[in-house]
Amino acid sequence: MTLNFTYTGSPARIVFGAGVRHQLAAAIDRLGCSRAFILSTPQQAGEAETLAASLGGRAAGVYAHATMHTPVEVSEAAVAAARAAGADCLVAVGGGSTTGLGKAIAYRTDLPQIVIPTTYAGSEVTDILGQTADNVKTTLRDPKVLPEVVLYDPELTLGLPVGLSITSALNAMAHAAEGLYAEDRNPISTLMAVEGLAALHGALPGIVADPRDLEARSGALCGAWLCGTVLGTVAMALHHKLCHTLGGSFDMPHAETHAVLLPHTIAYNAVAVPDLLAPVARIFGAPPGAALHDFATTLHAPTALRELGLKEADLDRAAAIAVSKPYPNPRPFDEAAIRALLGAAWAGDRPET
């Protein structure tokens, strides 16, 4: 086979290991900054305040209002608060919601970012920003959005509830799985995708058995980094389009929606590209969509959109929105095909392929 591809590596600085959160002050200094604005969700405000206290005079303030799907109005309020505080850099501690807020501020201000992930979202290593306005979620890519530094400290994930650990990890797995058939895939992105999927497949049962297993937590966090790097390297397809549709237009929970849809979207595309999804079958079993469903079931992950609050009456509108501005996908689809896929995911059916 003749190879022909383009690969651009991320310039982000990755620091991985137990206890690396204590290197935050040094990371701020390395950026040439001295006024860090700490971001979190309301639920993690205590952690953000503790972090700010540890920085002393390097902390410009705390903004604990990050929320799912990065609403534009929240981002604009955060920009105003960061400017009022005289911030010269951002520190996002938490999951995808907090990382998204940091990216949204950076997009508008070009402030450098440091991210300390506490979930397995993976978005901290991408130049992608998803924002919601008027109940529509859109995405963009811009170098300003990519965080400059990521401190991966598995100790910070020891207290992550098992349920959220699983759905967050399945969210990360979706990045890698779609990366396998991306139009602009390359050998490096494929290697990262396969390694990320294998790492999460190996780590998640250990987390279920013992949530404070540091080895399993380290494996999962490393897998999430690899999967997130795939997301930042190549384009996504049908799965991410459907998740953006359900999140932006129906306010569905982000990680849980990814978890439920993943077996169905992979099953749909496996019909067209079984060779490209062969690594999923090798890791999880065959056929890949059914095997992913079985894996999620053994982890007690949600498997039905109705369990997440989506109404059956919303499925027609969701399908229409999803096909109005479709992402490129290896298998063609129309509104009827998407309606059938969403119907199966809503009911929690086990895919056949």
Image (cartoon, rainbow, N blue to C red):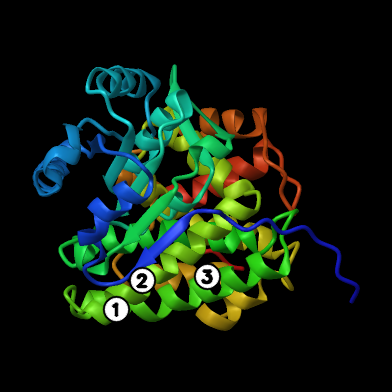
Q: Is residue 321 left or right of residue 76?
A: right
Give the numbered dot on residue 220: 2
Q: What residue is shown at x 69% (from left), y 56% (from top)?
A: 182
Q: What residue is shown at x 25% (from left), y 75% (from top)?
A: 207
- Estimate the x, y position of residue 184 in percent, counting from the top left: 74, 54
Q: Dot 1 surroundings within 10 Å: few (below 14), some, or many (20 or more)?
A: many
Residue ID for mark 3: 290
- Asked if residue 76 is positioned above or below residue 228 in the image, the reply reads above
Residue ID for mark 1: 216
Q: Is residue 313 visible?
A: no
Q: Which comes sooner in the sequence, label 3 or label 2?
A: 2
Q: Nearer the viewer, residue 245 or 215?
A: 215
Corner quadrant of residue 169: bottom left
- Estimate the x, y position of residue 289 in percent, counting from the top left: 55, 67
Q: Are marks 1 and 2 in contact (CB under 8 Å)?
A: yes
Q: Which tag is nearer the camera, tag 3 or tag 2?
A: 2
- C-alpha span from label 3 to label 2: 22 Å
